[in-house]
Image (cartoon, helix red, strand yellow):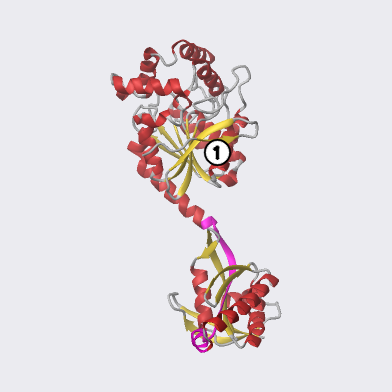
């Protein structure tokens, strides 16, 4: 893969966040990388990053970012580190700049905590969450005895400050995070280079302080987004107990315990890819269901249009169509409908009330008669799906087939419409049962009396 262009998004507090967008899959993904190796350009030169990016790109359109204080993004003050709420705005700013309305958030380590708070704050923009080696709290607590104590954090920060980026420190981190790559000097050198390009020693210490002071346990029960918590059982950085705690406190979360002891997302690719793909497929299905709404669809078209066009000639027929279209559009607007599309001389519109759709159909039939044409109309109410402003689904097909059965200046409806408008003053005549092409079963239709 080619290295994508690096761009900058600006947060509400004026911080510039470096990000890249790559991939072209069906979902939008925001990837919160480990702070220790976060540099959106250098990461592509390291095999550990390249493997993950290729895997993500095959599944969606990915926004990769350097959170504030890392990589190519603006730095943070070591004296007054930004709050977690401020850091969460990194995600929002990048999503806005990249044009992501809703996204699946991938979070590693304390980056997962940012994802959790974002999801609780912006549920309408969070399609799902996937974490690996996640942390919801940095420091020891009575109900989190597996987390580091103050003494352990102090030792870690001292080690970071004195050895950051050095061969000895890189080897130490390799033993912790990538035990299977111990002794691989090519890998270790590339790992150390990624670290040095991610942060300076003082910035790395500040990052550790922000991780230590993180605590989002209170927001976990508020998360509405489907969540997959992946954790290796022998994780050397974030114990499995942390993953279990997170999964137990997010409603409906799925815990995926993986074998092994490497604190790296490649473990998820190797052992959990099938489960992740199933999770993403379920999300896609759920999103499609959520985009389904109850609506009344109205179809109209001119009866005998082919013969009429041939008799009139192209120019005269085009003038007639323009007058017809103007009348139909005006009446759709008058009855508060939404024009969805036209096909030749036919119209498709949707309404949030079936009675208005029926009255609109009657009005259209009357309005176009002085033009010397007659239309037929079909009306049906059912669930429709909305994709990029277009409607689809079985209800749309049924409405079209109902309209195809109608005769000149006739408005036919399904039984559903007739039942829903009871008490509206509209009257109907039984038009019998019909087979609708491509639609299962036989359908009883009703003729609207003007």
Taking the magenta stretch, the answer to whether it contains residue 84 is no
Residue 203's place in the image compared with 444, above or below, is above
Question: Does residue 235 appear anywhere in the picture?
Answer: yes
Q: Which residue is at 64% across, 80% downward?
A: 364
Q: At which x and y percent is residue 183?
A: 28, 18
User: In which quadrant of the rendered view does residue 301 lie?
Assistant: bottom right
Quadrant (top left, top right, bottom left, bottom right) of the N terminus: top left
Residue 41's place in the image compared with 309, above or below, is above
**Residue marked by disc 1:** 94
Residue 156's place in the image compared with 53, above or below, is above
User: In which quadrant of the rendered view does residue 87 lie?
Assistant: top right
User: In which quadrant of the rendered view does residue 429 lie?
Assistant: bottom right
Q: Which residue is at 53% across, 43% downward?
A: 98
Question: Does residue 139 appear anywhere in the picture?
Answer: no
- Single out the residue that lies furthest toward the front: 315
Quadrant (top left, top right, bottom left, bottom right) of the C terminus: bottom right
Q: Which residue is at 65% across, 31% downward?
A: 13
Q: At which x and y percent is residue 106?
A: 47, 37
Q: At which x and y percent is residue 281?
A: 42, 50
Residue 351's place in the image compared with 66, above or below, is below
Q: At which x and y percent is residue 419?
A: 62, 76
Residues 214 and 38: in front is: 38
SS type, badge 1: helix
Residues 207 and 243: in front is: 207
The span shown in magenta is 289-311
């Amino acid at each position: 893969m080619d290295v994508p262009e690096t761009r900058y998004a600006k947060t509400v507090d004026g911080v510039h966040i470096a990000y890249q967008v790559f991939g072209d899959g069906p979902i939008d993904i925001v990837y919160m990388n480990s702070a220790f190796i976060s540099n959106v350009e250098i990461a592509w030169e390291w095999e550990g990053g390249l493997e993950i990016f290729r895997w993500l790109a095959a599944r969606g359109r990915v926004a990769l970012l350097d959170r504030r204080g890392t990589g190519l993004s603006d730095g943070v003050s070591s004296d007054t580190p930004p709050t977690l709420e401020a850091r969460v705005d990194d995600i929002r700013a990048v999503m806005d700049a990249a044009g992501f309305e809703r996204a699946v958030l991938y979070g590693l380590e304390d980056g997962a905590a940012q994802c959790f708070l974002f999801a609780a704050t912006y549920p309408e923009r969070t399609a799902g969450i996937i974490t690996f080696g996640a942390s919801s709290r940095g420091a020891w607590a009575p109900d989190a005895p597996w987390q580091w104590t103050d003494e352990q954090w102090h030792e870690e920060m001292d080690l970071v400050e004195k050895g950051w980026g050095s061969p000895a420190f890189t080897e130490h981190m390799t033993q912790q995070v990538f035990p299977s790559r111990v002794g691989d000097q090519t890998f270790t050198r590339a790992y150390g280079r990624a670290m040095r390009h991610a942060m300076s020693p003082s910035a790395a210490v500040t990052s550790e302080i922000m991780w230590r002071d993180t605590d989002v346990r209170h927001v976990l029960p508020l998360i509405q987004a489907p969540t997959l918590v992946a954790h290796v059982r022998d994780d050397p950085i974030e114990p499995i107990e942390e993953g279990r705690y997170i999964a137990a406190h997010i409603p409906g979360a799925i815990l995926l315990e993986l074998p092994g002891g490497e604190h790296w997302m490649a473990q998820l690719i190797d052992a959990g890819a099938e489960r992740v793909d199933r999770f993403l497929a379920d999300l896609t299905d759920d999103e499609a269901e959520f985009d389904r709404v109850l609506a009344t669809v109205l179809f109209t078209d001119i009866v005998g249009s082919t013969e009429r066009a041939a008799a009139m000639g192209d120019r005269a027929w085009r003038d007639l169509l323009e007058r017809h279209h103007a009348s139909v559009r005006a009446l759709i607007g008058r009855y508060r409908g939404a024009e969805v599309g036209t096909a030749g001389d036919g119209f498709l519109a949707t309404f949030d009330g079936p009675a208005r759709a029926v009255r609109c159909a009657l009005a259209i039939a009357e309005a176009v008669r002085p033009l010397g044409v007659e239309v037929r109309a079909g009306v049906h109410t059912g669930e429709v799906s909305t994709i990029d402003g277009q409607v689809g689904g079985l209800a749309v097909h049924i409405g079209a087939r109902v309209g195809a059965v109608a005769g000149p200046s006739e408005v036919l409806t399904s039984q559903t419409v007739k039942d829903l408008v009871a008490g509206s003053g509209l009257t109907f005549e039984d038009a019998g049962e019909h087979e609708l092409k491509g639609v299962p079963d036989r359908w009883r239709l009703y003729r609207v009396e003007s």
